[in-house]
Amino acid sequence: MLKTFKQKLLFLFLNGVGYFFLYLPHFLRFNFAKGIAFVLYILDSKRKFDLLNNLDFAYNNSLSKEKKQEILKTNYLNLVYNSINFFMLAVSSKQRFLETISIDKPEIITKLLQDKEKIIFVTAHFGNWEYTTPAFTCTFNHKITAVARMTSSALVNAYLKKVRQRFEITILDKKGATSGLIRTLKQTGVIGIVTDQNTTDNEGLLVKFFGKDVRHTPIASLLALKYDAKIVHFIAEYSKDYRKINIKVLPPLEFQKTQDLQKDIQILTQMQSNILEQIIRENPKEWLWFHKKFKNKYPQIYKY
């Protein structure tokens, strides 16, 4: 009973925060986010350390100090603005939500759905990644099942799940999600996976990324090969003034299957890593460089 009361109280408070930001004029909301991001930039030495080390390692110390500072400050701003947008997502109507996004080349998805293709919707921690799944369901009026990592707090998890499951989205816990993804592919045909984080030896394949060995989850490759699904990258980035979230839809990965499943999985996973690297190189400040992407093979770069 107490747990239920706490949850209701938390949801009521957070919905109030969502309505506050939703109706706050954009310039005030944006400047508030910039102020919080600046405080984090000054105080958060650990994340700053990890980000700068990631940049130096990935780019072989070739980035200028000015460029690294631009990426650092944008990462903090995106982190704060993503949080604000998440609170807003909890209370936004479908129509209001659609006014905040713009999808490039939606015909790619429309054609796949018309052809009744199974789709593995792949995204990364780029721009506002939380808006990619509702952008899909609200634009194409089709359900999606996505995977998310849970926190250690049951109350926080309940709120995150409640918000993420709005607009015809089903959320699976990352632990043990495979069976649910397979079931969805067979039934409704569309799943979503975030694939850019570091993984353990057991969960990831070694691929090249910025010329370095990293672990990359093979789940999208495995499911695509086993169930004849199309892998489509859906990447969100902010407009210059942060009024819009622009979403790129990349064409489905073209791949010729062979009789060697393990080799095919390796090649297809490397293709996804290559695409992620290309997307980041085109606009590095939008990717969340706080992640310890290189930790599996190069833990020494994160020693603080």
Image (spheres, rainbow, N blue to C red):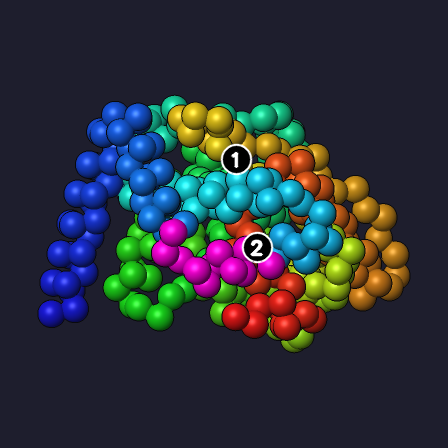
Query: Residue 245: x and y, percent?
Result: 46, 31
Q: Quadrant of the N terminus?
A: bottom left
Closer to the camera: disc 2 or disc 1?
2
Q: Secondary structure at mark 2?
A: helix
Residue 183, can we see it? no
Query: Residue 137: x and y, percent?
Result: 46, 37
Query: Residue 51: x and y, percent?
Result: 55, 55
Q: How many circles with numbers are drawn on the protein?
A: 2
Query: Residue 79: x and y, percent?
Result: 42, 47
Q: Is residue 47 covered in magenta?
A: yes
Q: Amino acid at mark 1?
A: Glu
Q: How many C-alpha atoms fall within 10 Å of the one at disc 2: few (<14), some, or many (≥20)?
A: some
Q: Is residue 257 left or right of residue 278?
A: right
Q: Secondary structure at mark 1?
A: strand
Residue 172 position by quadrant: bottom left
Evaluate if marks 2 and 1 touch, with contact meaning CB atoms under 8 Å apart: no
Secondary structure of the magenta portion, mostly?
A: helix
Residue 270 position by quadrant: bottom right
* In the image, residue 56 above or below residue 173: above
Residue beneath disc 1: 237
Residue, x 47% and y 59% (percent of image)? 47
Residue beneath disc 2: 52
Q: Is residue 304 covered in magenta?
A: no
Residue, x 60% and y 40% (percent of image)? 67
Q: Amino acid at mark 2?
A: Leu
Residue 150, can we see it? yes
Residue positioned most to the right = 259
Residue, x 35% and y 38% (percent of image)? 34
What segment is highlighted magenta in the picture?
42-53
